[in-house]
Image (cartoon, rainbow, N blue to C red):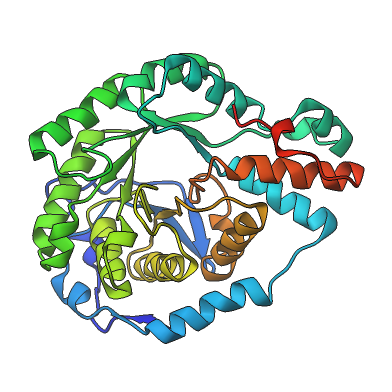
Amino acid sequence: MALTQNTKLGNAANINAGAPGLRPPVEREPLALLSGRELTANRGIPLNLDWIENVRVNTSAVERRAQTLVTRRTVKKDWQIAWLLRAITCMDLTTLSGDDTDERVRRLCAKGRQPIRQDLVKLLGIESLNIQVAAICVYHTFVETAVRALEGSSIKVAAVSTGFPAGLSPLDERVAEIRRSVEAGAHEIDVVITRAHVFGGRWQALFDEIATFKAACGNAHMKVILGTGDLLTLRNVARASMVAMMAGADFIKTSTGKETVNATLPVGLVMTRAIREYAQQTGMAVGFKPAGGIRTAKQSVEWLSLMKEELGASWLNAKLFRLGASSMLADIERQLEFHATGRYSAEYRHPLA
């Protein structure tokens, strides 16, 4: 394995469950399977500094393994269409621009409800599948707009919080922002960590910060954005991933989409292996969300392949996998139209919203 640790956790998942920000131990339905073992939702565990310090990443091995995903894995014809439809159901359609408006958010929600043109749905014979995206992701200002526009659907509303994208506003302001979004109806909160904690190896400070965010989220799911393009090394990525999961993250997410470097397959490999190791040690499953720089249908298949090979089929659903890739939807629609008609269409025929 490219990612390893040598410290035994023993029964750490079941001790100190009352630590600040951690969920109480309760009986839960299995969320996933890993090597035949049933996994529950993540409740967090006490910070294990020995585990964090012993994390190692073999960068060359990670890069070689990531390369195999794009060279020896391929799906064609009906299988490809099935994978692309699955990718749509795992998408978080996102608008995080300074010129966002209520009307733009409503259009995005309408696209989320009907991500594929109806004539294509009929040509493909997939009416009964009721394909929809997983979530609509917006700034706090537009949470109520999105909630109203999605009423009656199963699509979640996700809000970016905690001083997105830099995450450098005062802690009490970031926590208050989370609470306001939850009160407005957000089902999911995407939080941003303080990257300086990672650079300084201040793991207790990072743990406490994320645990505080989790407590403020209440029943809303928390996705922890690591800002991997800023973290400089894969070892930093692995360590930050572990701390976030220990602090109770429901998902770990690569990027805000605003960094110079966003989601890459080597980073994704390190994060999914951290998820796998955490699941093996604790019996708890954490989701994964690559975000930023994912624009083509081919890339969606690559990320799905990564999830299937590293974590297994039970991670290939919106409960445990999301794609932060709004611009990718138009290319997926073009591939679906080619499969149905034998002709590629102009991209303007597949508007995002």
Judged left or right of residue 19, residue 324 is right
Which residue is at a point 21% across and 75% down the rendered structure image? 51
User: Residue 274: horizontal and vertical position, in percent?
Assistant: 37, 68
User: Residue 318: horizontal and vertical position, in percent?
Assistant: 53, 44
Residue 77 to residue 214: above or below: below
Which residue is at a point 38% across and 82% down the rendered structure image? 59
The image shows a total of numbered marks equal to: 0
Q: Quadrant of the C terminus?
A: top right
User: Residue 209: horizontal and vertical position, in percent?
Assistant: 14, 49
Residue 203 to residue 123: above or below: below
Q: Quadrant of the N terminus?
A: bottom left
Residue toward you, 19 or 136: 136
Residue toward you, 147 or 338: 338
User: Residue 348: horizontal and vertical position, in percent?
Assistant: 70, 33
Task: Say if residue 16 shows up in the picture.
Answer: no
Judged left or right of residue 296, residue 344 is right
Which residue is at a point 53% across and 56% down the rendered structure image? 315
Residue toward you, 35 or 75: 75
> Residue 242 occupies which quadrant of the picture?
bottom left
Residue toward you, 347 or 1: 347
Question: Outermost residue, right direction?
Answer: 342
> Residue 200 occupies which quadrant of the picture?
bottom left
Which residue is at a point 49% across and 53% down the rendered structure image? 293
Task: Say if residue 102 shows up in the picture.
Answer: yes
Judged left or right of residue 146, residue 122 is right
Judged left or right of residue 25, residue 320 is right
